[in-house]
Image: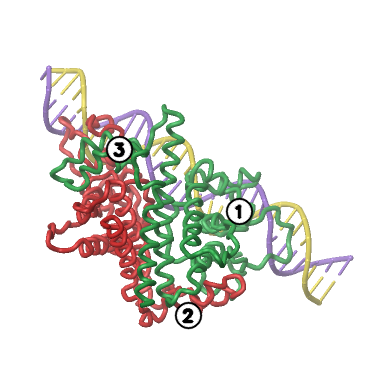
Chain colours: A red, B green, C yellow, D purple
DNA sequence: ATATACTGTTTATATAGTAAACTGTTTATG
DNA sequence: CATAAACAGTTTACTATATAAACAGTATAT
């Protein structure tokens, strides 16, 4: 199966080659009853409901009415299944280009959409990011991130650094928002454990002498995010994003003059 | 074992409680031949050499000359061992406060040190970050990150947002630098697979019509980082950091006027 | 017609993590 | 001092898990 890889795949990881559709479909033998897309879709829906730990080859196959081993006719290893899942949820709709809007709006839109992926698929942030994106949906998102900078007087390295800046911030914000979503869900059933309710424990542990700068932040509740109504920053993630955008604007100015 | 937790631990996860030293040492019975610190240290050294997949309860115990089950007298689960490892490598030396230096230098120093953790312990970035730090070493690092802002005219939410900004950027940069380190190591043995050498494959796959903005970046080699000497950005991570610092400066200015 | 390349399944193996029961040791208590 | 309780580390056992190998049936190329 993995030996039928198109030469264009070059040295790509198998998961990436599969995602690019570079593995030739078989010519003989019985009709396939499954497909990569179906398997990945099923795995994602399990992960959405039960987390990554719910995703086993057996579980995915059972859901489809097959045996675990049948999946290996499509995907060579679980690691590759996870890569395919990762790329699949990057297949978000990319809005049409708005040539009149300013670049700040476009970047905000990109970051917001990226964060949403983490909230829609809470397991997404549990997969390790191994280096640069190589798979098609993920790369379309990178293409999107580059779009607002098309006419910037910057070279490609500068642009990529900005993409890194935006995407890393989106990731971190996405993770935190995901955890907040979880806490709210847990709060709906108060018998369950509320993951963000560590405030009391921390207040007893963070002594002023050992943590002079963290101490007041814990005490005010800003660290764990209680009294969210007092949060002048507003929708948590927007503050940092505006700082990043300011920083970019600042750099553009310095380049123009 | 886990039932002997100090009440100050409150609702903390067990791993965090262990890390805070909130689990009372036993009063009777035979002398302990191991310690949490020793186990964690051993696990870290295995992970440093062989990656996270090398760390199994069996492997760690064998290294110490004990059976896997003996570890459970100290650490209730593997998940907790991983948490302890995560916190342990955050135990980096925190430089003394430099009251005369400016805040930008202090923040640069913090980010640089954080990135170094990812390079020294390549597995560190493979562990999922689950929400806010709760463990002592990690929180000392947060305290450090807050230090340069002590006299900023900002409230705690604003400060925490900036910490998020800096630490998320450090994480992403750290991951990329780790991967570059790996590629260089692989390059030293050219028979091995160089993880960053996907350039050729991508050049064939990223068509201009589907990826109008990414296409030129791939072709120039900026995406995969070939011709690093042409990278005007300089030491890759510094560019984004300066943008962030500019953004913060910009915000401070807008507050002052 | 038949060899070939497939399909999904069955069977088997190796490697986890960890629960429970066991043996021996130290300490607190009567 | 005797004994019970609390512990240490081990043995054994169980449950998942990923996945290799062999198998029986089916569609296609020659």
Label 3, label 1: how far apart the Cα atoms are: 37 Å
The residue carrying pointer 3 sits among few (fewer than 14), some (14 to 19) or many (20 or more) residues within 10 Å by Cα, namely: many
Chain ID at mark 3? A
Residue B29, image quadrant: bottom right
The answer to the question of whether label 1 and label 2 lie on touching residues, with beta carbons closer than 8 A, is: no
The reply to whether label 1 and label 2 mark residues of one chain is no
Where residue B40 appears, x then y in whole percent? 59, 53
Q: Label 1, on which residue?
A: B71
Can you say whether B194 is above or below B242 in the image? above
Where residue A3 appears, x then y in whole percent? 27, 29
Residue at image coords 39%, 53%: B172
Quadrant of image for the N terminus of chain A: top left
A119 or A216: which is nearer to us? A216
Quadrant of image for the C terminus of chain A: bottom left
Q: Label 3, on which residue?
A: A14
Q: Label 2, on which residue?
A: A220
Question: Which sits earlier in the primary sequence, circle 2 or circle 3?
Answer: 3
Q: Nearer the viewer, mark 2 or mark 3?
A: 2
One can see residue A121 in this view: no
Can you say whether B120 is above or below A95 in the image? above
Residue at image coords 41%, 37%: B183
Q: Nearer the viewer, mark 3 or mark 1?
A: 3
Q: Nearer the viewer, mark 1 or mark 2?
A: 2
The residue carrying pointer 2 sits among few (fewer than 14), some (14 to 19) or many (20 or more) residues within 10 Å by Cα, namely: some
One can see residue A153 in this view: yes
């Amino acid at each position: 199966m993995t030996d039928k890889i198109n030469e264009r795949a070059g040295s790509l990881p198998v998961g990436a080659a599969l995602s690019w559709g570079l593995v030739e479909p078989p010519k003989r033998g019985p009709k396939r009853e499954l497909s990569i897309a179906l398997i990945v879709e099923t795995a994602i829906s399990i992960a959405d409901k039960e987390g990554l730990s719910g995703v086993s080859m057996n579980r995915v196959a059972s859901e489809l009415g097959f045996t675990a081993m049948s999946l290996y006719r499509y995907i060579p290893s679980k690691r590759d299944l996870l890569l395919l899942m990762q790329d699949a949820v990057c297949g978000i709709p990319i809005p049409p280009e708005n040539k009149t809007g300013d670049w700040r709006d476009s970047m905000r839109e990109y970051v917001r959409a990226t964060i949403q992926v983490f909230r829609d698929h809470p397991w997404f942030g549990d997969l390790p990011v191994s280096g640069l994106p190589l798979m098609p949906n993920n790369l379309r998102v990178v293409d999107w991130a580059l779009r607002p900078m098309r006419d910037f007087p910057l070279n490609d390295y500068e642009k990529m650094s900005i993409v890194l800046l935006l995407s890393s911030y989106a990731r971190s914000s996405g993770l935190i928002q995901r955890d907040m979503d979880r806490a709210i869900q847990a709060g709906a059933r108060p018998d369950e454990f509320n993951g963000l309710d560590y405030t009391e424990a921390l207040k007893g542990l963070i002594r002023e002498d050992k943590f002079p700068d963290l101490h007041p932040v814990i005490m005010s509740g800003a660290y764990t995010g209680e009294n969210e109504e007092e949060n002048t920053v507003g929708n948590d993630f927007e503050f940092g994003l505006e700082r990043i955008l300011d920083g970019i604007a600042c750099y553009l100015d310095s380049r123009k003059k």
